[in-house]
Image (cartoon, grey):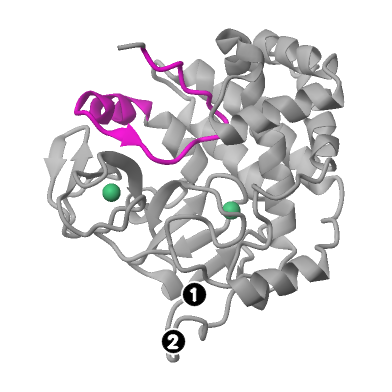
Amino acid sequence: MTQKILQPGEIGQNEPFPSVVLPTDPQLFANRARRFEHLARDGALAPLLRAMSQIAHAQQQAHSSRQAEPVNDALLTASREHAMPPLSFQAERDPAWQKDLDVILAALSQCGEPVLEDAARQLQAIDTDGREAIADAVFGGGIAGGDPELHAVLSPLVGAALQVWWTRQAGSLKADDVPLAGTSTVCPCCGSRPVASVIEMSPSQHSLRYLHCSLCSTQWHMVRVTCSACESTKDIAYYSLNGIEANKPSTKVAFARAEACDNCHSYLKIFTREKEPMMDVQADDLATLTLDMLVDEAGYLRSGPNLLFAPGVPDEE
Ligand SMILES: [Zn+2]
Ligand SMILES: [Zn+2]
């Protein structure tokens, strides 16, 4: 895996590990597709995961189809001066992401999976303004066109295209283009929330916890046993399908756990790569939806999205 690693120095001197890891692996989406296929071998989620592998394959085609757009120098300077994410998802959106959507839709419209083919053709019939409106809903947590069923089908494909555009742009940045913002709860590159976090095992990141951006695939370091939504270090509990677990690293911790915070009542998953070296954060997040259900039932709200999956409309209470 090729990864561009930021040099230490932004937080302090002598920092022995990278604070931010940019997504420079040209095969990121192909690897994800393989992981989805592996996870789809059996189980109740197999059809969903198989469809997701098709989407990730289409994302790889889009990602490899062209180079990143040049990132505006004024934007980079402003971001360096104010420690703001240079590719903020809240800034005006470059319509070029729709080129990636076109590649994804062309691939999926003849992928052999009827649900995906149908969704792709529906999106192909929607004009650019309509697609921007769905993208707004993906970012704003809303329901495009007020139609939850249609949104559930179309928004993962729009999310997939947005991921490709942002991942390619983030991968084209240089180390010092990404200033560390004051908070570690959002991506230093694009300002999005993480999809999950991973306790890593590569030599330079060994045993450290990195949050993975749900949009641009950048990873950034956060100390362990800290809520990734409010940075509280108290009242953190770890849930797995085996029940509540200890927070200290031990051979007994589950591969997938939910880090739940009683300060802000949210949770996000934390994976231990050592247990599944071939894991992919987006794929393994969707393969462990049962854990989400368990933690939802315990009363916690998930704090970061998976853009490939539109959660159901919350029940009216
Ligand atoms: Zn990001
Ligand atoms: Zn919290």
**At which x and y percent is residue 111?**
75, 19
Question: 258 or 45: nearer the eye?
Answer: 258
Q: What label sits on residue 18 in the rendered view?
A: 1
**At which x and y percent is residue 248?**
16, 59
Mark 1 burial class by Cα count in 10 Å: few <14, some 14-19, many 20+:
some
Question: 130 or 125: nearer the eye?
Answer: 130
Is 69 included in the stretch rendered in magenta? no
Amino acid type for the residue under numbered disc 2: Gly
Q: Nearer the viewer, mark 2 or mark 1?
A: 2
Q: Residue at x 28, y 27 (%)?
A: 296
Q: Quadrant of residue 308?
A: top right
Looking at the rendered structure, the secondary structure element under dot 2 is: loop
Q: Residue at x 22, y 28 (%)?
A: 299
Q: Residue at x 67, y 63 (%)?
A: 86
Q: Which portion, as a residue range, is magenta?
A: 289-315
Q: Quadrant of residue 43?
A: top left
Ligand 1 lies under 8 Å from the Cβ of mark 1: no
Horizontally, is 178 left or right of 236 in the view? right
Amino acid type for the residue under numbered disc 1: Pro
Residue 41 visible, this angle = yes
Horizontally, is 17 left or right of 148 in the view? left
- Which residue extends farthest bottom? 13
Q: Residue at x 85, y 27 (%)?
A: 128
Pointer 2 residue: 12
Q: What label sits on residue 103 in the rendered view?
A: none
Residue 54 visible, this angle = no
Earlier residue among tags 2 and 1: 2
Horizontally, is 57 left or right of 223 in the view? right
Looking at the rendered structure, the secondary structure element under dot 1 is: loop
- Which quarter of the rendering shows the C terminus? top left
- Which quarter of the rendering shows the N terminus? bottom right
